[in-house]
Every structure is written in C-alpha cells, then in structure tokens.
Amino acid sequence: MTTMTVAERRRLPGLKVGDGFTRHPFDEEFGVRTSGLVAGRHLKSGHRHDRHATAYYGVAPSVFRALVKRWQRSRPAAAMEEFSFLDVGAGMGRAVLLAAELPFRQVLGVELNPTLARIARRNLTVWRASGRARAAMKIISGDAVEFRLPEGPCLAFLFNPFGAPVMRRLLTAWNQSRSKALAGQAAPLDILYVNNEQESVLERQPGFARLFLGQIRRSRADAIADHRIMANQPEGEYASANYEDCSIWRLVG
C-alpha cells in the first residue's frame, strides 16, 4: 500500500493527475503553479460563504490583458500608478501575477480557501525572484466581504468567484465603505468582471454604472490550452469557449 505524503493529502480534488489535472502553458513558461480546476463544493474553509463558492480556475492571460487594456481606454479617474489592484477570490494568484507586471500602486489578492492562498503566496515568491513584478504584491487570507478596500483609487477584479448572495453583500459593503471613507472626496472604484454570471446583481446595485459588456476572446494558445484542460476532466463538469463574457463597472455615487 502506498502512503500519501502530507502535501498529497492537502491537495484539493482537481489538482491531482487522476482528477484530470493538466498544466497550463502559463505555468510551464514561468515556473509557477496556477493550473487546475477545483469545483466549488471542494473549496471548504469553514466559513459561512463556502456554499456560495463557484470554482477555482485561472483566468486566461490573454483575456485578462485584453480586459485591462479596455479598462485603460475607459478614462479611469486616475493614472494606473495611483490604482490599487484587488483580485477578489484570488485562488492561486494568476491574476495577481499578471497585474503585478503592470505599474499599479499595489496588487492585492483576497482568498478564502487556505490551501489556495498558500499556493498563491509561493507563486508570488517565484514572481518576485524572476524580476517580473513591477508592483508590490500580497495575498490576504479571508472573506472578501469583510476585507476593507485599500484607500485611494481601486480596480477590483472578479473571475466569477461566488454566487449572488455574496455578490450582493460585497457590493453593498463596497458602496457603503466608499461613501463613508473620504467624506465626499473622490474614492474611485472600478470593477473588471470575467465570466459575469451575476451581472444582474450589479445591474440592480445602486451607484454602479456599466462601462462595457461583451465577449473578450482568448488568444489561440489560451483557447487550445483551456479546451485541452476541460477535455481532461473525468466527469466533464465544466466547458470552455473561445471567449469570456465580461463587463466593466464604475462606482459613480
């Protein structure tokens, strides 16, 4: 009988070869670990919001970069260098790594699952050592609803991290914190939303204006990689298209 190591026991379902685990070319190129697909039911942390988790999957680099470029054309309230970038439901940190290549004031990731957060911190160490990071990076373990937004302009990124109940709580908390924090002074908050399944929640939330709604196509390399990864799922639970449905929102008051 084979004895499992501690690391193997900790490995989440979907991160084992037997579960169909397939490395994304991003990981192969940069020596990080952001691959894998973990269903929401396996992302247990003991928090009351666990049941609303969707799944872990790293955003396609080409989709992330294209959406950020579109945001830059939306006339943000300040220069990128003044914005903090916040990845909500950061997982293993792929979006944090990509954002850190840009000149944000700081790049933060909030992740509820302790195993994913631990992997993300190791990835950040690799990224710093490679010299690719242009911004300070940090992973915070905890619930995004309870996390206080950084002061000053903030760009929040969501890759469909949770269902409607948590999304409503998050947006309400953000709206309240921004309205109170600076006593009438501008506190810009923009949102990049990939795989925007809870778009209707944002549509009903007071104070937010939509700047963009549409499909962002994957690059050919990312599309091939994601189709291959999805095809290796033993149960075929998830599917991949050549694009992501995305939106960009701005808190306007």
Image (spheres, rainbow, N blue to C red):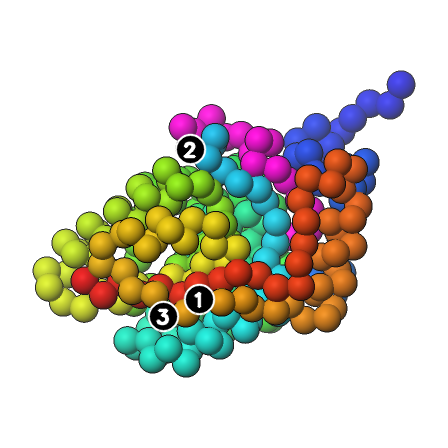
Find residue 213 and name its label.
1
Looking at the picture, does residue 77 appear above or below residue 108?
Answer: below
Spot occupied by residue 144 in the image (x, y as percentages of width and height): 38, 44
- Find residue 42 and report its horizontal and vertical position in percent: 60, 31
Give 88 or 237, whichever is nearer the viewer. Answer: 237
Residue at the spot of label 3: 211
Label 3 crowding class (10 Å Cα cut-off): few <14, some 14-19, many 20+? some
| Res 49 label | 2
Number of marks present in the image shown: 3
Please name which of the two marks, 2 or 1, marks the residue nearer to the observer. 1
Q: Quadrant of the C terminus?
A: bottom left
| Identity, as a three-letter code, of the amino acid under mark 3 | Leu
The crowding category of the residue bearing disc 2, from other C-alpha atoms within 10 Å (few below 14, some 14 to 19, many at least 20), is some
Q: Which residues are magenta?
A: 32-49
Amino acid at the residue labelled 2: His
Q: Magenta stretch mostly in which secondary structure?
A: loop
Q: CA distance from mark 3 to mark 1?
A: 7 Å
SS at mark 3? strand
User: Tag 2's secondary structure?
Assistant: loop
Secondary structure of the residue carrying numbered label 1: strand
Outermost residue, left direction? 183
> For the residue marked with disc 1, what is the amino acid?
Leu
C-alpha distance separating marks 2 and 1: 27 Å
In the rendered view, does 88 fall on the left or right side of 226?
left
The mark nearer the N terminus, 2 or 1, is 2
Query: What residue is drawn where x is 66% and y is 34%?
Result: 12
Q: Position of residue 245 (x, y in %)?
A: 53, 60
Report how far apart the C-alphas of labels 3 and 2 lie in the structure: 29 Å
